[in-house]
Amino acid sequence: MFLLAHISDIHLSPLPALTLRELISKRITGYINWRSNRKGTMTGGTLDVLTADLKMQHPDHIAVTGDLVNLALDEELETAQRWLKTLGRAEDVSVVPGNHDAYVPGALKKTRRYWEAWMRGDKELAENLPVEFPYLRIRGDVALIGVSSARATAPFMATGDLRSKQAKKLAEILTETGQRGLFRVIMIHHPPVRGAAPSHKRLLGIGLFQRIVRQHGAELVLHGHTHLATRYDIHGPNGAVPVICVPSASQSFGAQKPPAAYNLFSIEKTNAGWSCHMKQRGVVDTQITIQTVHEDQLLSGR
C-alpha cells in the first residue's frame, strides 16, 4: 500500500516588512487583503500542529498544491524553501505553484529557482535539467504529475491557465504511465472543474484539461485554491476520476472558511484493480485538536 498525503494553500505567515517599491504594484491589494481578512485567521501555529500530525502518519509521499506564500516576496520564497526542508526530503515531497506564488511578473521564475528541488521531475533530476511543467515523478506504482496553473494576473484577479504546450505533454505522460499500469495522480493548483471557483479565480483551460483526462485517463486529481473540502468527478475512459480539494493548511478554527486539514490517500493495487481510500484529518476546535473528520472510498477495484 502507498500512502499519499495532500496539503495546500499554506500561506506562510507572518508577512515580512514591505518596502514602498514593493507596495507600488498588485502587492498593495494583496497586502490590504492579508491585513483585513487573513492576518488573524491563518496562523503558523495551526500549520505547525497540522503538519506534526501529518508526519505522525508516516506518508510515503506528500503533495503540496500551491500557495505556499502570499505576495511572492523574495524573503517569503526563502522562508518557504526552509519550511519545505522541514516537511520532508525533496524526493518525498512534490510541489506545484499557486497564483500567490506567481503574484507579480517575474515571481514564478524565482519560485522555480527557490523550490526547484521539490518541483523537478525524475528525468530533469537525472539529466540535471531545469524545472519543466508538467513534471513526472514515479514512486512505487504511483505516478505523480505536477501541472502548473500559476501565472501573474491583474489586481483583483486570481485566475490560472493551462496552455497547449503543457496540455500536450500532460497527454503524453498520462498515456505513457497508463500503459505502464501506474496509479496516475495529477497535481494542479486551480480547480479543473466548472463552478468550483468564481470567474475571477477560475482556471482558463478547464475544457482542455477535462478533454485530456477523458481521452487519456487518470486515477486522481488533487488541487487547492478554494480553501474548501470538495469532491468533483471528471468522466474518464475507465470511469469517474475523483477531483479532490483540501482546506488551507493554516486556517484557524471558527473562521469563515473550513479549518485546516490534510488528506491521506491509501492506494493499493488489488486483483480487482486499484483501490483508493481517502481519510481527511483536520482541526476540530480552538485548541487545534486534530481528528479524522471524513472518510471516503474513492476507487474500489478499478
Image (cartoon, rainbow, N blue to C red):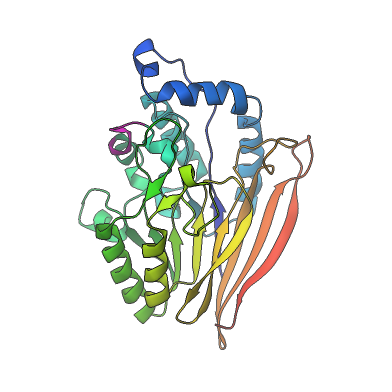
- The quarter holding residue 270 reads bottom right
For the N terminus, the quadrant is bottom right
For the C terminus, the quadrant is bottom right
- The residue closer to the viewer here, 68 or 83, is 68
| Range drawn in magenta | 104-109
Residue 285 drawn at (x, y percent): 79, 40
Asked if the magenta segment contains residue 67, the reply would be no
Q: Is residue 271 above or below residue 130?
A: below
- The residue closer to the viewer here, 193 or 301, is 193
Residue 106 drawn at (x, y percent): 28, 33
Name which residue lies at 62% across and 36% down. 48
- The residue closer to the viewer here, 210 or 13, is 210
Q: Is residue 26 above or below residue 275?
A: above
Name which residue lies at 33% across and 75% down. 175
Residue 19 drawn at (x, y percent): 39, 12
- The quarter holding residue 137 reads bottom left
